[in-house]
Image (cartoon, rainbow, N blue to C red):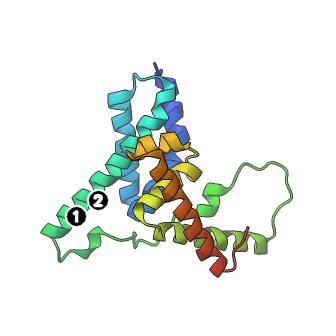
Amino acid sequence: MATEQELSDFLKNVEKRAFKRSLYHVRNEEAALDIVQDSMLKLAEHYGDKPVDELPMLFQRILSNCTLDWFRRQKTRNALFSNMSDFDGPAEDGTEFDLLEAYAGPDNGERAESAEDLVRRAQIFKDIEAEIQELPARQREAFLMRYWEEMDVAETAAAMGCSEGSVKTHCFRAVQTLSKALKAKGIEP
């Protein structure tokens, strides 16, 4: 059984990645934050007594369900208020999630990058982020779980509610699509 401290540590550990994953799906920072907070509350309320090793799978499933619920609510809201276009699309308040900051690790004494390297790196991350957003939803979900959340195939399949073969297919197609798109932009590993 997870203690309060273990649950708190788990939630602190996953919050940034969960936010980024939600942001990729809904493309709205406020909505992504709401989805993550709702998912965390549901995990704590309904599954806080589960063993710590079960929390990652449960949380991923809850996060996926909360994201689907958000899309369902948006679809209903848009059907009811079809003339109100501000319910979908990215936030237009000028704030952006800093992908470079999200990837930046702690200062470990390595040589400092030049301003040019930092700008080039930021642009590459921006290009990668844009290409991930263009992936079909299931491919994007599988890709983010496998490579962003570092879940294995079985965990991803359980969280997505599909077979392991489907996860492998979605990931393969996502990687192929991303690779082709990034090569077209001159970005190669």
User: At x 51% / y 27%, what residue is drawn?
Assistant: 53
Report how far apart the C-alphas of labels 2 and 1 lie in the structure. 6 Å
- Give the camera-side residue of 35 and 160: 160
- Give the camera-side residue of 167 and 117: 167
Q: Locate the C terminus and report the quarter of the image it occupies.
A: bottom right
Relative placement, left or right, of 88 versus 152 is left
Tell whether label 1 touches label 2 (CB within 8 Å): yes
User: At x 42% / y 39%, what residue is drawn?
Assistant: 59
Q: Is residue 45 above or below residue 141?
A: above
Q: Locate the N terminus and report the quarter of the image it occupies.
A: top left
- Give the camera-side residue of 167 and 123: 167
The amino acid at mark 1 is: Lys
Residue 13: image tag: none
Disc 1 marks which residue?
Answer: 75
Q: Is residue 88 above or below residue 112?
A: below
Is residue 19 visible to us here? no
Q: Label 1, secondary structure: give it.
A: helix
Disc 2 marks which residue?
Answer: 71
Relative placement, left or right, of 163 versus 180 is left
Q: Could you say where residue 12 lies in the image, as x and y percent from the top left?
A: 52, 39
Residue that sits furthest to the left in the current view: 80
Q: How many marks?
A: 2
The amino acid at mark 2 is: Phe
Mark 1: few/some/many CA within 10 Å (<14, 14-19, 20+): some
User: At x 50% / y 26%, what residue is drawn?
Assistant: 52
Q: Label 2, secondary structure: give it.
A: helix
Q: Could you say where residue 51 lies in the image, as x and y percent from the top left?
A: 47, 22
Residue that sits furthest to the front in the current view: 165
Q: Could you say where residue 127 lies in the image, as x and y percent from the top left?
A: 59, 73
Q: Could you say where residue 135 lies in the image, as x and y percent from the top left?
A: 47, 67
Is residue 174 visible to us here? yes
Mark 2: few/some/many CA within 10 Å (<14, 14-19, 20+): some
